[in-house]
Amino acid sequence: MTRPRSEQELRRREERAALEAAGINPYPYAWEVTRRSREVLETFDDARHQPVDGAPAPEPLRVSMAGRIMSKRIMGKAAFFHLQDAQGLIQVYVRRDDFPEGFYEEVFRKLLDIGDIVGIEGFAFRTRMGEISVHAERLELLAKALRPFPVEKEADGKVYNEITDKEFRYRQRYVDLVIHPEVREVFRQRALLVSTIRRFLDDRGYVEVETPVLQPLYGGAAARPFTTHHNALDIDLYLRIADELYLKRLIVGGFEGVYEISKDFRNEGLSRFHNPEFTMLELYVAYRDYRWMMDLVEEMVERVAIALHGTTEVVHGDRTLSFARPWKRIPLLDAIREATGHDLAGRDRDALAGIARSLGLEIDSSMGAGKIIDEIFGTFVEPNLVQPTFITDYPVELSPLAKRHRDRAGLVERFEAIANGKEICNAFSELNDPDDQRARFEEQARLRTAGDEEAMQLDEDYLRALEYGMPPTAGLGVGIDRLAMLMTGQETIRDVILFPLLRPEVERQGDDADVG
RNA sequence: GAUCCCGUAGCUCAGUUGGCAGAGCAACUGACUUUUAAUCAGUGGGUCACAGGUUCGAAUCCUGUCGGGAUCACCA
């Protein structure tokens, strides 16, 4: 089934045919780029580069550039257009009399459109209106655009005809990126965030590794997995929900610091904080505990803020977050006591349920003590933690892979860092007692049979690894997408993921079985 | 998965009580050799998301479907 082509698409195809008839290849092979736009704008020096009364400049700034035509203003025998390259926009000036006979009228004016990709060669100058521009003496089509681009215009800081259709922008991200420089910038910042973290960890000698995405058992987190099938072995496999158990096997194996930055997959709903595939950093360091890991997280995140913004202060909406060290540290139960006036220490499950109900929460019989504490925290504490804060020492039943607290019964040595009301990382002193780990897995199995689909599976091979001995270890998980949202001021995860999951387009609306 | 809102030209949007489908940008023709939301004159462009229904008559009212957004629930 084919989608009928619009008038404008048909016309562009006719133009392509006309170009070919004129001996012009609409898709040539290469173009020598000597300068990009921002570079030219920054390099231009009126004293040396500006032509005087039609005579060449003392030292002409000659450039060869390439990019996409973003606007076209034709004034008879001369014209201006804006060219967009990877660095931004630059205005180009063309005159009929600079080109071979007929080229300006028949090719430039009639056959080149907004969206076409061209190469230009010429010299930089400043126009009467003061805009640094390139006077093109050579102009070649490098790729014909067969679809019209949406055209946004801007004047006095106001944008006209701005593309607001989120679906259009996510489905055709390539168009979104062409039209919106600020979207490109978000993804450059995200890349800088990841490379900053990677350099930070590499500098400390931690080894970046890759562990299986396809796993016969899934573990390391509480979540529902995606299932797939391997034909040759005829077995079902799961897409990983976390890297944790494999990375800790590597600590058993003698690596003293390993990390992985990669996609995890969780078969759950979509929201502005959730995409089914998302990027996670996990780090494990031998002979360290969670207190040490808090220091490392502070330093790493502070460094990211400085790399992206040049300062530890990050503006997010109408809030300014300060990632300067040190961050506030407060035990979970203390934070709840401060926020609600209730001291939950030592309370049994039913007492906790009573307190939660008195606070207006709905509690059902399937919820254990840990879950109830988590609900209270998530409702009354977490949303109010705007500045980066470490919440420490979680109930043991919420943390089946974390080591018991050295001083406090019923708790584990675990922390989360919260900023802007959202978790940005989760870490603990790793449980390395294989018998305790087995008991925790068995408790998870009990929850699973009681109906908790997200309870962890018992992983015998992981227990076998622990039985060989794992050194004391500190572990960390950071949701990179969430951190990117925080650091780039985005309100939805879809704006920090280039191609977020959407329902597939149906063929009817859709584009495009091609008809020549 | 639940609730609410949205879907009209390539793009942004109007469309009154149910009565001929509209504007700006983009496109096309013409004028204009330093313009910049360029300007001026003219022209074309529609599966009103899709399928039914009510009606003399539906973009408009009703039902269903598809897609998107927001909120909620689960989770990081």
Image: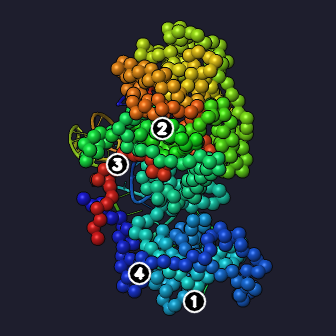
Element type at mark 2: helix
Marks 2 and 1, the one that precedes in the sequence = 1
Give the amino acid type for the residue marked by disc 2 in the picture: Arg
Please tell me how crowded label 3 is: few (under 14), some (14-19), or many (20+) other residues with Cα within 10 Å: few
Give the amino acid type for the residue marked by disc 4 in the picture: Asn
Q: Which mark is residue A25?
A: 4
Marks 3 and 4, the one that precedes in the sequence = 4
Q: Answer yes or no: is residue A228 visible.
A: yes
Query: Residue A392 vs residue A51: left or right?
Result: left
| Residue wearing tag 2 | A249
User: Distance between the Cα atoms at labels 2 and 4?
Assistant: 57 Å
Please tell me how crowded label 1 is: few (under 14), some (14-19), or many (20+) other residues with Cα within 10 Å: few
Please tell me in which quadrant of the rendered image residue A137 appears.
bottom right
Q: Which mark is residue A12?
A: none
Give the amino acid type for the residue marked by disc 3 in the picture: Pro
The chain under label 3 reads: A
Please tell me how crowded label 2 is: few (under 14), some (14-19), or many (20+) other residues with Cα within 10 Å: some
Q: Which mark is residue A97?
A: 1
Query: Residue A434 vs residue A201: left or right?
Result: left
Q: Are marks 4 and 1 in contact (CB under 8 Å)?
A: no
| Residue wearing tag 3 | A504
The chain under label 1 reads: A
Residue at image location 47% in from the left, 29% down from the top: A467
Give the amino acid type for the residue marked by disc 1 in the picture: Asp
